[in-house]
């Protein structure tokens, strides 16, 4: 079925990681998020994919054009990010008069459930959560979706909207919706109309992840790293130990005395050790350096970053070209055991995670022997002085 993938958004909640990299291009176990979305869509039944790009459009377009896809993949540019209905409207000229699937390019959908969605005539992918009030919640009767309510105080069900839809062909004519209260043209208004005229089914997803905030990028990596099988193409010392499903890409080097516990991926051109301990689920992007006496646990370290000496880094996300000075220690657990909070667009938000460390934008530099508290966000290019204890974002 023809498919529209929405990938034009700026990803403001993901800042500072999206300061230089559009959200669809953030790495998930070695592949950009949007590439994973397309691969899953094609495996599930997409016959042609129209990707709507916008923020840093050229970067996304180039990454998609570089790949060899088994079905046609085209991109269209949404000039202004006016909302999801506007994004699909941008794709309209590329769509035939047939039913079409829409997927969020910044979400992970499990393939089996996605395949079921593709078998439907009109449907919404639904996902069961314990606390639905912060989502779009579906009103479902006997498997039929009657509507969707945004962030309701009194949710009509525990089924939330995954942003994965099958629309009937007629919906192509319904995309000119009015602006919503928050000033966007919303696809949920098109869905509402579809619910009033067609039998829109709720297709439950076994697994789904909306990757909107930094800790969700960590969760996305945990998910996809866990699906990797052991593969060693790089140069691994006989005196290093790889436990479980560890991928060492070609051109990577693992020195003596290193222990890597899977799931973990060491990207091409990376150098680990000697004497480092890398624990799952950890993703080391291409050309990353991890040196002597370093422990990295459950973290994402993007391209060209260095954690060269005597550092502990846990449950954290580092952007590109970050350098942590010798002896940098990151806290990842509160003394009261409560979930770690992070500031997202000026508001403190619970990550829902008992363990979470820090988020560093591209180019962050920390001095020797500094300590960084849980839930700290360091913006792109921020510096930390030697010996400093960081208790506030900068
Ligand atoms: P959002 O996650 O709501 O928006 P965003 O990606 O810009 O992130 P943030 O809120 O942090 O700024 O968007 C959902 C999906 O729709 C996502 O894949 C991006 C896409 N999208 C568009 O393609 N065009 C648009 O105009 C908007 C608003 C979103």
Image: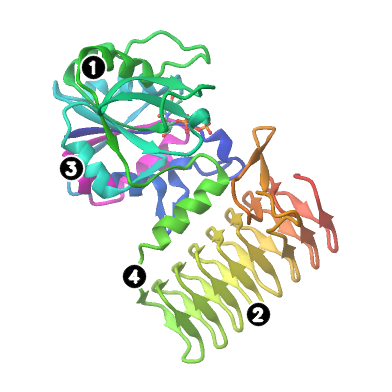
- Please give the name of the residue rendered at 75% of the width and 54% of the height, measured from the top-left corner: 336
Look at the numbered disc 4 and say if its residue's Cβ is closer than 8 Å to ligand 1: no
The location of residue 129, given as percent across then percent down, is 45, 39
Q: Which residue is mark 3?
A: 45
Where, quadrant-wise, is the N terminus in this rendering? Answer: top left
Q: Which residues are magenta?
A: 39-68
Which of pointers 3 and 2 indicates the residue nearer the eye?
Answer: 3
Q: Quadrant of residue 256?
A: bottom right
First in sequence: mark 3 or mark 2?
A: 3
SS for tag 3? loop
Alpha carbons under labels 1 and 4: distance apart: 41 Å
Q: Which residue is mark 4?
A: 229
Labels 3 and 2 touching (C-beta < 8 A): no
SS for tag 2? loop
Callout 3: 10 Å neighbours few (<14), some, many (20+)? some
Alpha carbons under labels 1 and 3: distance apart: 20 Å
First in sequence: mark 2 or mark 4?
A: 4
Alpha carbons under labels 2 and 1: distance apart: 58 Å
Foreground residue, 95 or 251? Answer: 95
Disc marking residue 171? 1
SS for tag 4? loop
First in sequence: mark 1 or mark 3?
A: 3
Disc marking residue 292? 2
Q: Is residue 100 left or right of residue 106?
A: left
Alpha carbons under labels 3 and 4: distance apart: 24 Å
First in sequence: mark 1 or mark 4?
A: 1
Callout 2: 10 Å neighbours few (<14), some, many (20+)? many
- Please give the name of the residue rendered at 39% of the width and 73% of the height, measured from the top-left corner: 250
Q: Is residue 178 left or right of residue 359?
A: left
């Amino acid at each position: 079925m023809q498919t529209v993938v929405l990938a034009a958004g700026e990803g403001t909640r993901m800042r500072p990681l999206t300061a230089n990299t559009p959200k669809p291009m953030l790495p998930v176990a070695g592949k950009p998020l949007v590439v994973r979305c397309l691969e899953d869509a094609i495996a599930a039944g997409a016959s042609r994919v129209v990707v709507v790009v916008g923020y840093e459009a050229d970067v996304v377009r180039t990454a998609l054009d570089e790949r060899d896809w088994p079905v046609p993949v085209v991109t269209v540019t949404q000039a202004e990010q006016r909302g999801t209905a506007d994004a699909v409207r941008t794709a309209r000229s590329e769509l035939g008069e047939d039913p079409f699937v829409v997927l969020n390019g910044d979400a992970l959908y499990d393939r089996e459930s996605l395949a079921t969605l593709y078998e439907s005539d009109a449907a919404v992918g639904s996902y069961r959560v314990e606390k639905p009030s912060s989502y779009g919640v579906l009103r479902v009767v006997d498997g039929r979706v009657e509507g969707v309510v945004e962030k309701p105080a009194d949710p009509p069900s525990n089924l939330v909207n995954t942003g994965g839809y099958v629309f009937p062909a007629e919906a192509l004519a319904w995309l000119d919706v009015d602006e919503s209260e928050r000033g966007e043209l919303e696809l949920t208004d098109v869905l509402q109309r579809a619910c009033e005229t067609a039998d829109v089914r709720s297709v439950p997803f076994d697994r789904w992840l909306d990757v909107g905030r930094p800790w969700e990028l960590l969760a996305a990596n945990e998910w996809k790293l866990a699906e990797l099988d052991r593969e060693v193409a790089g140069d691994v010392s006989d005196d290093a130990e790889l436990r479980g499903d560890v991928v060492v890409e070609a051109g990577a080097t693992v020195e003596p005395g290193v222990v890597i516990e899977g799931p973990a991926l060491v990207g091409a051109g990376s150098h680990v050790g000697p004497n480092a301990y890398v624990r799952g689920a950890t993703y080391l992007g291409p050309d990353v350096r991890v040196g002597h006496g370093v422990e990295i646990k459950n973290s994402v370290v993007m391209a060209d970053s260095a954690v060269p000496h005597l550092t502990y880094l846990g449950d954290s996300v580092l952007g590109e070209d970050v350098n942590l000075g010798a002896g940098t220690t990151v806290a990842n657990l509160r003394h009261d055991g409560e979930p770690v909070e992070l500031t997202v667009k000026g508001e403190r938000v619970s990550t829902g995670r008992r363990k979470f460390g820090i988020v560093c934008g591209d180019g962050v530099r920390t001095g020797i022997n500094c300590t960084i508290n849980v839930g700290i966000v360091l913006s792109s290019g921020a510096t930390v002085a030697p010996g400093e204890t960081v208790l506030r974002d900068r």
